Image: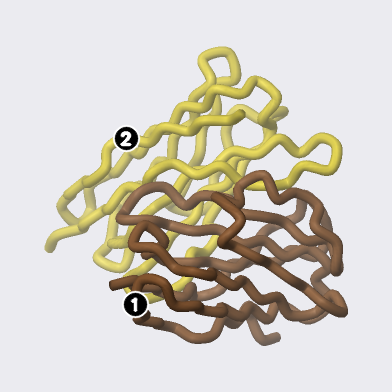
Chain colours: A yellow, B brown
Amino acid sequence: GENVEQHPSTLSVQEGDSAVIKCTYSDSASNYFPWYKQELGKRPQLIIDIRSNVGEKKDQRIAVTLNKTAKHFSLHITETQPEDSAVYFCAGRDNTGTASKLTFGTGTRLQVTL
Amino acid sequence: EAGVTQFPSHSVIEKGQTVTLRCDPISGHDNLYWYRRVMGKEIKFLLHFVKESKQDESGMPNNRFLAERTGGTYSTLKVQPAELEDSGVYFCASSQWTGGEQFFGPGTRLTVL
């Protein structure tokens, strides 16, 4: 089955700096990679996703890159703000057939300091 | 539009007792998923319903866990009897179609003493 590894487990950056979170996956059949943000006491929310036919996707200050050959994908947050502080989860999914379960990484706790 | 809701938000029980968690998906979402996060580890898949049918229950840890979705609306997850290692946060998610974006509920924090 799929295995997703995520690094680092904790990340502290100063406001305005960039943050990068990296994930690797094992199943070459995985073709969909969402990123979820969970603020303290709240539900995980999808912030960006990427499909395997795309190498990069950007949404304002957030971008995700995917390297299918190396089986890794990364989340990039630029100009970080205090409200970016949260736990971020990467995930992978094989979207073919009827399978649709997500396999998550262990999460990265991002702290943006003033 | 109301999001996915879960009840209760917290539950503290003793080892050997029974607990039932409930999830109400977003209206019209045929797909319902249960996940669990134990002790700060990854969020792990438990099972997937399409309407009232179990599409994938490969993540259910053992037969102490029973999930139902009678009528294809809300779902329940019963743990009987509960063990210490069952402690964690149980998330429910729903999606409109298989392979679509999964919307998560706030989770139920289960503590087994």
Give the residue type at disc 2: His
For label 2, the residue is: A7
Quarter of the image where one finds residue A93: top right
Q: Chain of mark 1?
A: B
* Callout 2: SS: strand
- Say how many tags the image has: 2
Frontmost residue, A43 versus A68: A43
For label 1, the residue is: B14
Residue B27: horizontal and vertical position, in percent?
A: 78, 81
* Whole-number angstrom distance, CA of label 2 to CA of label 1: 35 Å
Q: Residues within 10 Å of mark 1 (few under 14, many from 20)?
A: some
Q: Are marks 2 and 1 in contact (CB under 8 Å)?
A: no
Q: Nearer the viewer, mark 2 or mark 1?
A: 1
Q: Chain of mark 2?
A: A
Residue B110: horizontal and vertical position, in percent?
A: 40, 73
Give the residue type at disc 1: Glu
Q: Residue at x 85, y 62 (%)?
A: B53
Q: Residues within 10 Å of mark 2 (few under 14, many from 20)?
A: some
Frontmost residue, B58 versus B104: B58
Residue A26: horizontal and vertical position, in percent?
A: 54, 22
Frontmost residue, A37 versus A15: A37
* Callout 1: SS: loop
Q: Residue furthest left?
A: A114
